[in-house]
Amino acid sequence: MNSRTKKFLSYYKPYLGLLIADLACAFVVSAITLMLPLCIRYITINVLEGNSQSPLSQIYAVGAVMLAMVIIHTLCDMFISYKGHMMGAYMESDMRRELFDHFQKLSFGFYDEHKTGQLMTRTTNDILSLTELYHHGPEDIVISVLKFLGAFIILMYIDVKLTLIVFLFLPVMAAFAFYYNKKMNVALRVSKDRIGDINAQVEDSLSGIRVVKSFTNEHVEKEKFAYANKRFVDSRREGYKSETYFHEGLVGFTQLITITVIVFGGAAIVDASLELADLLTFFLCIGILIEPIQRLVNFARLYQEGITGFDRFMEILEVEPDIEDADHAETITQVQGNIEFQNVSFRYKDRYGYVLNRVSLVIKPGEYVALVGPSGVGKTTLCSLIPRFYEVSEGRIMLDGRDIREITQHSLRKNIGIVQQDVYLFAGSVFDNIRYGNMEASEDEIIAAAKRANAHDFIMALPDGYDTDIGQRGVKLSGGQKQRLSIARVFLKDPPILIFDEATSSLDNESERAVQDSLERLSNNRTTLVIAHRLTTVRNAQRIVVLSEDGIKEQGTHEELLARQGAYANLYHMQLTI
Ligand code: ADP
Ligand code: MG
């Protein structure tokens, strides 16, 4: 058994009791189905043909037995349908949770490569198709095998020759089913990819709807969507075509078998080598013999849908997080905030060139260091290496003398606060969003953090104050307001190390002042690395580091760097003249 099969079966584990009950019910249902034609045969031969002394009481007795069997059959069927489906739903929910938990482990690199909409499809649609398989799979197999074998035995008992004639058709039927089933599966797999594309397209267009409208590019989005939509329809066309051949073919075979039995069975009755009661039973049993084939066909479809869903599920689940804690990783608590880049080189996975080349840099505890340099030179990249969002390609980064790879990611990131240009706020209230910085914080602490972030006044002016719903991603707030909420969040987190990445770059002058003010308050007594585009905001830094394509070009205070008349002086004068 390969590891995926094992994994597939492992989801049954918590529900073994349910599974066994489900299979027992399936067994009873099949047995009763097989017994009913035998009861009918019994009545026909022993009672209706006048072989009994007390025919009426026998009919009542057999009728009562059949009624009891039908009631049990119904109860078992109900159990299968209700509890069996719920078992599938529980298993599906377990898997969905496991996948979501796994998403939380994967690093930035993974999300650079995957579209959100595609990942959403994997968490919903793909897993959905598994419920049916998990529930119907085992029971379908039990029912099919039992009914098929049972019907076969009864048929053989009644008439060997007629049974063998029926069985001549079965291999052809099976080969036919196998061929078209395979075609259906390929189409299904493609369909699943295409629906993922549609979701990705919707996610992308709707997330960017404000950009779409401002560029009046609705038609572009419509076309992109229409294309994805059409490709999906095309893939379904293939699927339905195969499915139609498949079904009609099987129905045709069934009818062919029926006709054959009528012809040969009728001839046998004329010959007096077969009784009418037996032909009747034979017909009833052929229905039971063919039903498993149709059930298996249905199962094959469920299986394919479920398995493609499962494969896609496993594809993600098997992605190893590329950044993991070392076995001996330590949890850090008392952080001084001494950060040291030692010959650090870095390149993104899918890129040829290095973004950072042998960068060495020391930031002392409590120091306020500004990082400047042209756009695209790797400032953001450098910052994202400190919390280990990406792993250095060469060299190492030390925190308080310890390689950050020897520190648990959790405790490392607990000690770093980041304020970026693009603020991400979650749908919910102001309270919820600030509390994100420390889920244990009290309301008073949240308000105190908001005050220190210069956010309290504007929050109080919102319709419901701290309970105001800020809309998806905080759309109901201005840029400056969002930024101040994100700073309040970091105040609450209270980390010894701070990174500000162009935190004020997209703000107007007035909000910039308010944000700058709160950032300075935040950076008191903490190691702070600031990336700023506007050099006027970095003038006061204790040290300014100029990053260029070939590493760190110069560093010093504003005055020192101006006096050097190097890269910094050039940048500075260029900005003054704009
Ligand atoms: P800066 O912040 O200095 O403007 P960045 O660190 O954002 O520069 O980017 C440095 C280089 O790395 C750029 O050439 C950019 O295209 C590339 N880059 C940034 N992020 C990624 C990513 N997630 N995957 C691949 N390349 C990236
Ligand atoms: Mg940047």
Image: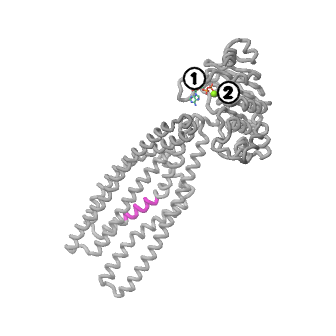
The answer to whether residue 60 is seen in the rendering is yes
Whether residue 134 appears in magenta in the rendering, the answer is: no
Q: Percent x, y for residue 535?
A: 70, 22
Taking the image as shown, residue 495 lies to the left or right of residue 169, namely: right
Q: Which residues are magenta?
A: 138-149
Query: Which class describes the residues within 10 Å of circle 2: few (<14), some (14-19), or many (20+)?
Result: many
Contact? badges 2 and 1 (CB < 8 Å): no
Q: Which marked residue is nearer to the observer: mark 2 or mark 1?
A: 1
Of 454 and 140, which appears nearest the observer? Answer: 454
Q: Percent x, y for residue 347?
A: 58, 26
Compared with 161, 110 (above or below) is above
Q: Which residue is mark 2?
A: 397
Q: Type of residue at label 1?
A: Tyr
Q: Type of residue at label 2?
A: Ile
The answer to whether residue 330 is seen in the rendering is no
Element marked by disc 2: strand
